[in-house]
Image (cartoon, rainbow, N blue to C red):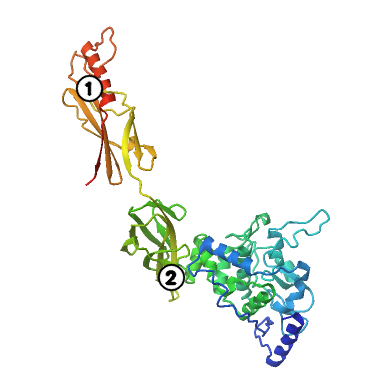
Amino acid sequence: MNRTKLAILSILTSVSLGVFVFGAPKEAVSSYAYTNGDAATYYNSIDKYDSGSTLTSKLNTLNNQKRQRLIPYNSLFNYFDETDPPSGYGKVTAFYSGKSISSGITREHVWPYSRLYLNGTDSSGKRTDEGKNEIEQDLQMVRPCYSGDNEGRGNAFFTMPVGQGWDPGSLGVESYRGDSARIIFYCAIADLNLTLVDKDYDNKDNHTMGKLSTLLEWNLKYPVLKREKNRNEAVESIQGHRNPFIDHPEYACRIWGNYNGDTKAVCASYGFEGQVKINNSDVINEEYLLEVDENATFAASFTGTATPTYNWSFSTKGGTEQTTDVASIAGSGSSISVKGLKVGTTYLKLQATYTMSNGATDTVFRTVKLNVVPRVDVTSIQLTNFPNKISYYVGDTFDPTGIKIVATYNDGSTSDVTNKVTYLNTNFDSAGTKTVFVKYQYKDVTVETSFNVFVREQGGGGGGTPSSSGGCGGSIMSTSIILSSLSLISALLITVSLRKKKKK
């Protein structure tokens, strides 16, 4: 619909129906409502369980796909009579005050211009960001405003108590706090260079806005009103896209509710307290590596005072449940185990259903990616370095210093398992050649090797460990012992045995 027809329609509607707004100050609200007819399908790409960075990314993609045009900055004035029409022709509704004005109108950057991610100006001062910054030319962010109100706000954050920030409800219409919060949320998903922080001031070069916990509270405390819904429809009819936080205010807590303790408390106090997580010491960045037939255990944790009921299943990345012929989930409640997954990738989905503080029932979910690889088994172990000490007296303690054990697996890989093996037959209670057994268990398979050491009776009055060299006052190893040691070394090189057996 062109702007001339819209203006005429607005006049006729206002004359026939009238606009009655009581209270001080009086807020001018258009009675005309746009209907684009796509409310049921616009958010089809968004799963109701999406949250955090996943939801941010999906909303950003959706916004880029739906937004069909940008409005040149100097042309934004031409559309305010469509997006913010009051009851009188030739006027617009001023943001913050809600008054109908026809002069002193300026373009209010709800996300301040100096805090946007812009390309700046050239040497002559001419703007160079025109056509390059989407938020700067987006009717979802730029609002008509009385110039004095615009100057009073400056580039301050939104917060209350004010501190270093500014309260958009300070001009008499408290409900504009909710509008402002939802516009700021929109900017953060429309331009991923922009960030929300939970403080009332930050350096403008950081391209941040806040105060996040206050904005979340305003979003929940001041519900979406007719004026926001009408404007959302108007902007879509002009540019093709919507503000998702007007249609779905709950998205804000799903994205930023876990930012810190204050944001958690705000969202919890208004019913959005559900945050569920899958716990496992080996889960890294929501991914878990396991092998075919491996039994992996997972536990649930829930943020909030409610006691949820848990449902575990296998799903797609987006949370759509799927079944498998082999895999199984054992157990229920907050702790389960999975086994039997085929080689490939699937997702384990944890769904928590609970009663919120407002009495309504909510369901939240989390998925963890399961990367399933072929089973790896150990096939053998080898002594690549023998122990430093191979000759003992009866009663001595076995010393493995210097030994190195390397395991070989059926996928061709090897690993140093020296610190994971156990030694058997190390009780040197009699003289002679002793066989020390080395065992290594990997999963349910045990492999074994062995080597020999020489044990002799105490003698020569000195005791202690045999010496390989003599001297004044010292004992000299006999020729027979030296020969025995040489024989022992030969035996070590020859008699390394390897046995593999299945653990029962």
Q: Which mark is residue 454?
A: 1
- Please say if 124 is above or below 264: above
What residue appears at the point 32 percent right and 28 percent down from the top-left corner?
A: 401
From what the image shows, is residue 179 above or below residue 303?
A: below
Give the quadrant of residue 37: bottom right
Sequence order check: which comes first, mark 1 or mark 2? 2
Residue beneath the point at 81% across and 57% down:
125
Residue 478: in sight, yes or no?
no
Residue beneath label 2, please? 363
- Seen as rendered, the residue at the extreme bottom is 16
The answer to whether the residues at label 1 and label 2 have Cβ atoms under 8 Å apart is: no
Disc 2 residue crowd, few under 14, some 14–19, many 20+, Cα 10 Å? some
Q: Amino acid at mark 2?
A: Thr
In the rendering, at what x and y percent does residue 372 appear?
A: 40, 53
- Residue 391's x, y, as percent? 25, 21
**Distance (Cα) linking label 1 and label 2:** 69 Å
| SS of the residue under disc 1 | strand
Q: Secondary structure at mark 2?
A: strand
Depth order, front residue of 42/187: 42
